[in-house]
Amino acid sequence: MSHVMNTYARQPVEFVRGQGAWLYDAAGRKYLDALAGIAVNTLGHNHPRLVRALTEQVGRIIHTSNLFQNPLQEQAADRVAEITGLDEVFFCNSGLEANEAAIKVARKYGHDRGVNEPAIIVMEKAFHGRSLATLSAGGSRKVQAGFEPLVQGFVRVPLNDLEAVRQVAARNNNVVAVFVEPIQGEAGINVSPLEYLKGLKDICDRRQWLFISDEVQCGLGRTGRWFVYQHAGFLPDVVPLAKGLAGGVPVGACVVGNRAKGVFKPGNHGSTFGGNPLAMAGVIATIDTMKDEGLLENAARVGNAIREGMAAGLQGLPGVVEVRGMGMMIGIELDRPCGELVKMGLEAGIVFNVTADNVVRLLPPLVLTADEGREVVARLAPLVREFLSRGATPQAKTAAAR
């Protein structure tokens, strides 16, 4: 009997090593990794520069706490500030913690402005984490169920609906921030139009609200720019980060600037493990390698080729609703639940997952080559065709892939 708490429905595969965009299981089978540990393994597996940086750091010092000077944290913060365009970085250990910090920044910002019960506008179908505050900010009843009462202070509106935000603004004087994932990952790779994001930012500027851009999954080069908001051409006030920030080492960051700069003072927030030397070595090596190897450009080029290849390979196939995404963040929505595809993929030697019950999610490492991108299409498209040919019951109207 396992003593590990039963919180995951794990696949019956044990990966024991990896190289680049490939994984190997305990039986020696080889798999093309199109998931990257859910957008975590930015540099793929066993990247020599990351391995060297982490190994050398382990040999020096792993942890000292934030009670003492940490030059590596300063160096990592400089790099994060440079790529975000913002000013201050709080390091933590996960996306959940980065989003918790963002919520606290927004509430503190409100209190500093005389708002006694600050409210944050959040979006339907959003996912910001599984703590009580972040699951309350999210829009998934499946995630929230069983953990009521939820944390108050969130006003939920439909995604991509500026008028709904304006209506809230007109009747709620307690709003201090808008909290949005520019691309909803867990909800099925729902991409917000850039004009919508610009519209949200304009409302925030007019109302002096904070714009919080949750880029935990969609950030760090995955869309072909460092962050989605850079595609839209503006700077948010708060940007939570995690996942791919250190290439696989647990780390999160809450980055602030503009209206949010200086909101946190000593004693307002903290973390025992956050910003430890080992994680900071991972952040520095990951960001520097991404720059030196041109991985943003690679994400845009190879990711777009995968999306176009999947759309072409599934064009006109009944049961395919849409192929969508940006860069190496891709969703293939079907008209029926398709969790069975994950096991079919493992049997065919490709790793991906299914989210929102009916969306195949691809989040490959950013080192994926053009040839490997073509291999993703060559392995996955036939699996989708085979799955749909079995005639499972649709749950939504079908349309041609695009």
Image (cartoon, rainbow, N blue to C red):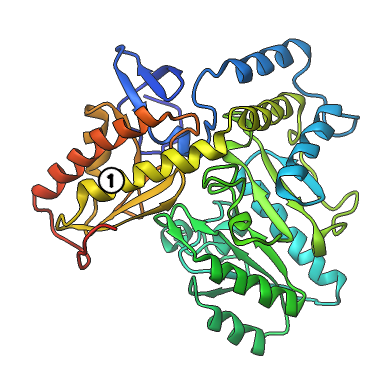
Query: Which residue of the protein is positioned furthest toward the bottom in this rendering?
Result: 171
Which amino acid, mark 1?
Met
Residue 343 visible in the shown view: no
Is 258 on the left or on the right of 177, as rendered?
A: right
Give the quarter of the figure containing the N terminus. Answer: top left
Is 345 on the left or on the right of 182, as rendered?
A: left
Q: Nearer the viewer, residue 221 or 160?
A: 221
Residue that badge 1 annotates: 310
Residue sitting at x 23%, y 41%: 341
Query: Is disc 1 placed on a helix, strand or loop?
Result: helix
Relative to residue 151, is residue 87 depicted above or below? above
Residue sitting at x 22%, y 28%: 348
Q: Nearer the viewer, residue 13 or 327?
A: 327
Residue 115 visible in the shown view: yes
Image location of residue 162, percent across then percent down? 55, 79
Image location of residue 266, percent across then percent down? 91, 49
Q: Nearer the viewer, residue 394 or 134?
A: 394
Residue sitting at x 54%, y 28%: 43
Residue sitting at x 42%, y 53%: 325
